[in-house]
């Protein structure tokens, strides 16, 4: 009998990750994260939900070269000169489009807006891990409801930190 290959997919809210990592005063090495997801969780496809601005094409190309599937969201320019994008709907939509193609999912976010998706994946036995970027700052609802599924990038800082000399 031939053993069927198990496919795990990751769904990553890049804005949540960026803001939470920045709040902890370190910089994430996206290449190291992609390798970590493949090695630790056997992630075949890693969907990165990210805001699109024309001047970041080099970054987007790099992310795709190191193995992310980028799902772009147009960016809103706010009156405060900040940019904002909200990828929640895209992340939920793509995870459901891909639902039959993966064995387990890894969701990386701190946002409780994904609670319904997490709840559904737990109920259907499709959630491998919920990874929060900052163990000290994420939704209370996620903490109390699914704490046994949660890991944090905070604990992986030494492994995943970006340094100039490793590029």
Image (tube, grey):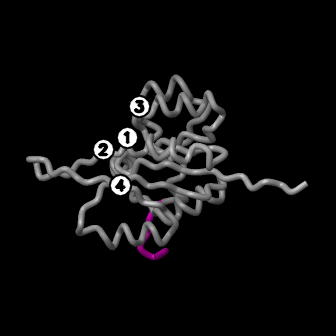
Please name the residue that numbered disc 3 is placed on: 112
In the displayed structure, 125 sits above or below 61; it is above
Image: magenta residue range? 161-167
Please name the residue that numbered disc 2 is placed on: 86
**First in sequence: mark 1 vs mark 4:** 4
Residue 105: in magenta span: no
- How far is disc 1 from disc 4 in space, using C-alphas? 12 Å
Q: Residues within 10 Å of mark 1 (few under 14, many from 20)?
A: few
Please name the residue that numbered disc 1 is placed on: 89
Q: Residues within 10 Å of mark 3 (few under 14, many from 20)?
A: some
Q: Do residues under tags 1 and 2 come within 8 Å of each other at their CB atoms? A: yes
- How far is disc 4 from disc 2 in space, using C-alphas? 9 Å
State which mark lies toward you, 2 or 3.
2
Element type at marker 3?
helix
- In which quadrant of the rendered image does the N terminus lie? bottom right
Q: Which residue is found at the position 35% from the left and 56% from the top?
A: 72
- The dot on residue 50 is 4
């Amino acid at each position: 009998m031939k053993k069927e290959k198990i496919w795990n997919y990751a769904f990553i809210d890049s804005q949540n990750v960026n803001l939470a990592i920045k709040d902890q005063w370190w910089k994430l090495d996206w290449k190291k994260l992609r390798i970590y997801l493949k090695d630790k969780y056997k992630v075949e496809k890693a969907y990165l939900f990210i805001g699109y601005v024309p001047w970041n094409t080099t970054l987007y190309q790099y992310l795709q070269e190191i193995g992310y599937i980028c799902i772009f969201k147009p960016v809103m320019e706010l009156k405060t000169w900040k940019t904002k994008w909200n990828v929640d709907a895209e992340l939920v939509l793509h995870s459901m489009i891909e639902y039959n193609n993966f064995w387990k999912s890894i969701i990386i976010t701190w946002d409780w807006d994904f609670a319904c998706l997490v709840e559904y994946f737990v109920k259907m036995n499709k959630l491998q891990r919920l990874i929060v970027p900052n163990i000290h700052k994420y939704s209370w609802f996620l903490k109390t409801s699914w704490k046994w599924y949660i890991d944090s990038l905070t604990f992986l800082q030494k492994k995943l930190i970006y340094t100039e000399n490793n590029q």
